[in-house]
Amino acid sequence: MALPTSGSISIDDIKTELGITGELSLMDQRVRDLAGIQSGSLTLPNDFYGKSARTVRLVITSYETIQMGMGWNPQQYDRITFSVSVTPYLAPSSYSWGGDVYGSGTSATFTGPTYQPSGFTYQAFGNAYCSVVVGGRTYELSLDFQYTAGDAL
């Protein structure tokens, strides 16, 4: 769970966010990493408003080219699968996918247009979007991607 976006923040709040027990100094590297300030002084609470020790990212988990049919004129399309990565791990409680991807649970899929493998090569761009709730906090994630016929990147 992220630190509050207003009001007071104590060293105990920071310890809880970082999952640390025992002594902790504002000069500790883990505290600096949380604040996003690597040198100089830190100010409580301003440098810590809304900060989270959790990293939530949108990632590509697989991509493949699907062939439909056989013979002289087969068709193909590209499929890219996306999911949410949470570090340290905590299962998201809800997902809402958008952009150029479609999903209703833990992953979403982009399906490119069909093309002939022997035809011209095209290149296009897409966007994967997910609003995901992790630990009671909503994260808005977006990932732009590029794909070429038969070669999703």
Image (tube, rainbow, N blue to C red):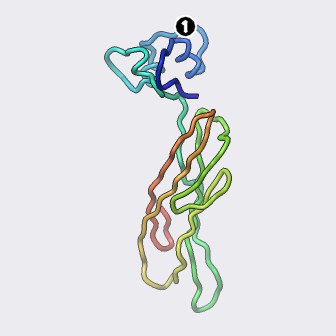
Query: Which residue occupies the foreground of this view, 115 or 144?
Result: 144
Residue at horizontal 46%, vertical 19%?
A: 31
Of 143 and 131, nearer the camera is 131
Q: Quadrant of the N terminus?
A: top right
Res 54 quadrant in image? top right
Q: Is residue 103 above or below residue 24?
A: below
Disc 1 packing (10 Å; few <14; some 14–19; many ≥20) = few
Front residue of 39 and 141: 141
Q: Residue furthest front?
A: 7
The residue at the far bottom in this view is 72
Q: Quadrant of residue 13?
A: top right
Up the image or down, 146 lies above or below 139; here it is: below
The residue lying at 43 percent from left, 78 percent from top is 121
Amino acid type, callout 1: Glu
Q: Which residue is painted at 56% across and 61% down in the image?
A: 101
Please provide percent x and percent y for residue 100. Answer: 52, 63
Q: Is residue 77 above or below residue 81?
A: below
**Picture coordinates of residue 127 (x, y %)?**
47, 59
Q: Which residue in the structure is indicated by mark 1?
A: 23
